[in-house]
Image (cartoon, rainbow, N blue to C red):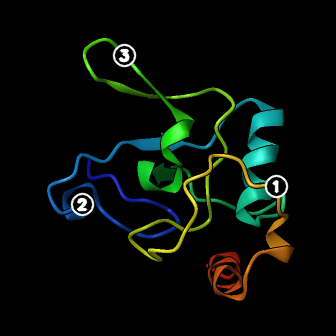
Amino acid sequence: MVQQCYLCKIYEHQAGGESLKFHSLPKNPERRKRWLSALGFEENHQFPKRVELCSKHFGENAFVYGSEGQKTLKRDAIPLISHSLLDPAVSTSSESSVSPEKQEDSDCIYICHFNHL
């Protein structure tokens, strides 16, 4: 099955040689609520059956690395609305202390666009 990021629409083979991982929306209600809030979605947003975000939507500090270099998403990681493939000035923080409504105008474009998909 071909994986595609719900937010940026990048496919796994479009990463320019970089290995992308894809992360499903959390099933845990509290984690899911935090993700949706960070991404600017309402809790009742109608998603398709399969929703995944590419690893580019998480800062480097959102991952833990195993002894053999494998990358695993931390349980408390929060995704970013944008990433370096979309905007090179994006922060690499895994948590945003700014609500989606108060992010810079460039991020608002993404929020508005993604809320209307």
> In terms of sequence position, does the residue under pointer 1 or pointer 2 come before the other?
2
Disc 2 versus disc 3: distance between alpha carbons?
22 Å
Query: Dot 2: few (<14), some (14–19), or many (≥20) neighbours within 10 Å?
Result: few
Left or right: residue 11 versus residue 54 is left
Q: Which residue is mark 1?
A: 97
Is residue 26 toward the left or the right of residue 67 in the image?
A: right
In this figure, which residue is indicated by the disc labeled 3? 66
* 5 over 73 or under it: above or below: below
Q: What amino acid type should be assigned to the residue bearing mark 1? A: Ser
Q: Are marks 2 and 3 in contact (CB under 8 Å)?
A: no
Query: Within 10 angstroms of label 3, few (less than 14), some, or many (20 or more) residues?
Result: few
Q: Residue 34: image x %, image y %?
A: 79, 45
Q: Is residue 32 visible?
A: yes
Q: Which three-letter amino acid code belongs to the residue tagged 2?
A: Ala
Question: Sequence order check: which comes first, mark 1 or mark 3?
Answer: 3
Residue 51 appears anywhere in the view: no
Q: Nearer the viewer, mark 2 or mark 3?
A: 3
- Foreground: 9 or 82? 82
